[in-house]
Image (cartoon, rainbow, N blue to C red):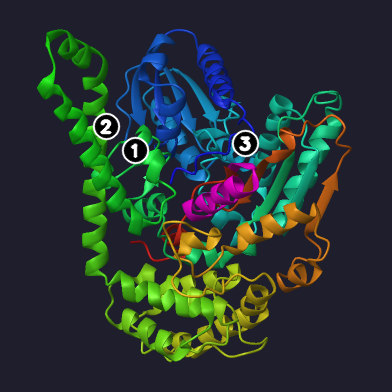
């Protein structure tokens, strides 16, 4: 089910221009250091850089050797050092240590720091503090939109989630505004804007200011994309906490897809590789094996055609078809191997039981059994990250009312993690002023009473309520199904969670697009605690073609999952829309938990 687009589906914009722009800008920055130079690259930037400018392009612009920014002394003998880094304090200390070591040795070289996607004042302060501000030249590589697919752009900023939703650090919001400004400059203005969430509103206002400052740049342009929808991750944590069961999501949960490349059995394959993948990526996992087996039989039949061929036909077959068949065969083998590997892992962790518990939590049934299952999960110490995820799902779906009397093995080292989950609203309170849950009071006994008291106060003051049950009812997130839900022929977006639940984020987008406003959704917005942060901005649509009005850019601030992408692709096919996704990073439940964890794995 590649979701073949309806014949009347609008064409997607060509995002390869974004890659060309980023490449040209990087080359321009490198050429400002004429002659041979060594390039130090931060690990996080290696994969994105590889998709923009590979090693041979860098070599053409006199980059001699490549080094990874890491905590060991650099052995570069070059007279010019260039650093391509994220704007992080630790990187500034690393660069300072190299420059100062050179100074001590009486060595003079040229140093250039290229910050991506932007430089922060705090970084320059550190360079000054270290006494090297005058020795290095600083530049920005404003590369913040990486096309991972024809309909998926990523800012590759996984830290956005923790920085904003936990620390309240707003520095990346400007990066988002700049990215939106670039898109509207290249692809024309967006006639209809919608958004929900505090961060969405700030990013939107900052972006609007940029547009006004450079008034005229997009004036008179025909819009290519008719709608833009900004959504904060914390509007819907539930979807991101669920186990994924569409193929691409399950591959990400099991092996991790990083920057469009997969690890595990599909190692290194670009997750866009081949028609095979495109046909199964949005498919519910239960259909994938059958599809691949059928594909293998068809392939065999094509190979078998050789038997009755004469020399001329054989020559044609070898020159025109054989290479393609071999490539398809290789990809089929890879995906069959991945499926087997997933099945093995999932059988070992009793995936069926896990999914049953998640569905019960989503539907609000058998809460006692689900709580026992989670307690057992914690006691077995299989995976602390997985146990935390289930606790958060229980807490949010039960509006913080679920009290796990967990005789847990969470030691005092997890106290900070619990505090983080609370602050971000992933573990919710029953009522303001409540005491610690049983699990935390047990953990707290391991630290001094005074410290525990402080933590209790901190928790109560940050109490956040989740109204998931009421929202779920209002938006009909749990489909009423007579008989079995047919996953081969999905009837709605709930298929991405086996027919049990329609992703809240996707339902909100669907409802707002239907109404072209938040009208009639006041109660939902109130239950989401977003009354001040839901907005609509419509401009006159006289310049927008009917085709552009069926293109929708959805911006996820804090990350989006492959399940949400599959669900909206499905919705688009049903309604004759095409969705384009822009996310700060692709995320899943494990990444959310890891971002909140203070216990290093």
Does label 1 or label 3 sit earlier along the sequence? 3
Element on which disc 1 rests: helix
In the image, residue 453 above or below residue 238: below
Which is in the foreground here, disc 3 or disc 2?
3
Can you identify the residue that label 1 sits on? 276
- Does the residue at mark 1 contact the one at mark 2 (Cβ under 8 Å)? yes
Element on which disc 3 rests: loop
Does label 3 or label 2 sit earlier along the sequence? 3
Instruction: State the CA–CA distance, disc 1 to disc 2.
Output: 7 Å
Crowd rating for badge 2 (residues with CA inside 10 Å; few <14, some 14–19, many 20+): some
Can you identify the residue that label 2 sits on? 328
Instruction: State the CA–CA distance, disc 3 to disc 2.
Output: 28 Å
Q: Residue 9 bears which disc, if any?
A: 3
User: Residue 369: horizontal and vertical position, in percent?
Assistant: 40, 89
User: Residue 540: horizontal and vertical position, in percent?
Assistant: 89, 37
In this picture, which residue range is highlighted in magenta?
A: 561-581
Residue toward you, 76 or 600 = 600
Residue toward you, 230 or 387 = 230
Displayed quadrant of residue 331: top left
Q: Does residue 240 show up magenta in the picture? A: no
- Residue 551 appears in the figure: yes
Which is in the foreground here, disc 1 or disc 3?
3
> Which residue is found at the position 18% from the left and 35% from the top?
300
> Which residue is found at the position 32% from the left and 52% from the top?
288
> Which residue is found at the position 59% from the left and 67% from the top?
424
Crowd rating for badge 3 (residues with CA inside 10 Å; few <14, some 14–19, many 20+): some
């Amino acid at each position: 089910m590649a979701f073949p687009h309806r014949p009347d589906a609008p064409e997607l914009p060509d995002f390869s221009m974004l890659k060309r722009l980023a490449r040209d800008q990087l080359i321009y920055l490198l050429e400002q250091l004429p002659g041979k130079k060594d390039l130090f690259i931060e690990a996080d930037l290696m994969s994105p850089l590889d998709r923009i400018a590979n090693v041979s392009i860098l070599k053409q612009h006199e980059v001699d050797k490549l080094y990874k920014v890491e905590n060991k002394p650099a052995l570069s003998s070059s007279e010019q050092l260039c650093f391509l880094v994220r704007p992080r304090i630790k990187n500034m200390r690393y660069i300072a240590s190299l420059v100062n070591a050179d100074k001590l040795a009486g060595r003079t070289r040229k140093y250039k720091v290229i910050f991506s996607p932007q430089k922060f004042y705090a970084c320059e302060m550190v360079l000054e503090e270290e006494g090297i501000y005058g020795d290095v030249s600083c530049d920005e590589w404003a590369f913040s939109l990486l096309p991972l697919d024809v309909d998926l752009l990523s800012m590759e900023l996984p830290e956005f989630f923790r920085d904003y939703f936990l620390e309240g650090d707003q520095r990346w919001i400007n990066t988002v505004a700049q990215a939106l400004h670039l898109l509207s400059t290249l692809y024309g203005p967006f006639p209809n804007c919608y958004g929900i969430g505090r961060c969405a509103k700030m990013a939107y206002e900052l972006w609007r200011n940029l547009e006004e400052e450079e008034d005229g740049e997009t004036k008179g342009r025909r819009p290519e994309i008719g709608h833009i929808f900004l959504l904060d991750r914390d509007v819907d944590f539930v979807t991101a906490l669920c186990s994924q069961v569409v193929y691409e999501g399950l591959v990400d949960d099991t092996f991790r897809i990083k920057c469009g490349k997969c690890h595990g059995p599909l190692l290194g394959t670009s997750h866009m590789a081949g028609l095979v993948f495109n046909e199964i990526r949005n498919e519910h996992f239960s259909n994938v094996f059958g599809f691949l087996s059928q594909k293998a039989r068809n392939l065999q039949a094509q190979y078998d055609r050789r038997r009755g061929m004469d020399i001329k036909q054989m020559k044609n077959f070898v020159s025109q078809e054989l290479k393609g068949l071999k490539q398809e065969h290789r990809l089929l083998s890879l995906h069959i191997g991945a499926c087997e590997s997933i099945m093995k892992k999932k059988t070992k962790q009793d995936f069926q039981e896990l999914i049953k518990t998640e569905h019960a939590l989503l539907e609000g049934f058998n809460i006692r059994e689900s709580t026992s299952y989670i307690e057992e999960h914690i006691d077995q110490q299989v995976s602390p990250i997985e146990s935390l995820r289930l606790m958060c799902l229980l807490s949010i779906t039960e509006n913080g009312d679920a009290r796990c009397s967990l005789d847990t093995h969470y030691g005092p080292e997890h106290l900070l993690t619990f505090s983080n989950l609370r602050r971000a609203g992933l573990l919710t309170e029953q009522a303001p002023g409540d005491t610690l849950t049983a699990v935390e009071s047990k953990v707290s006994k391991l630290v001094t009473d005074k410290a525990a008291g402080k933590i209790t106060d901190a928790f109560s003051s940050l109490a956040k309520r989740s109204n998931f049950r009421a929202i779920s009812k209002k938006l009909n997130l749990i489909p009423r199904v007579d008989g079995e839900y047919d996953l081969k022929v999905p009837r709605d977006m709930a298929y991405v969670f086996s027919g049990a639940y329609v992703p809240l984020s996707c339902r909100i987008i669907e409802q707002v697009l239907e109404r072209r406003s938040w009208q009639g959704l006041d109660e939902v917005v109130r239950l989401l605690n977003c009354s001040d942060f839901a907005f609509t901005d419509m401009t006159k649509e006289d310049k927008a073609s009917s085709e552009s009005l069926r293109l929708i850019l959805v911006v996820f601030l804090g990350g989006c999952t492959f399940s949400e992408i599959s669900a909206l692709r499905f919705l688009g096919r049903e309604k004759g829309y095409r969705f384009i996704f822009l996310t700060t990073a692709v995320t899943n439940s494990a990444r959310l938990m890891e971002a909140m964890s203070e216990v290093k794995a």
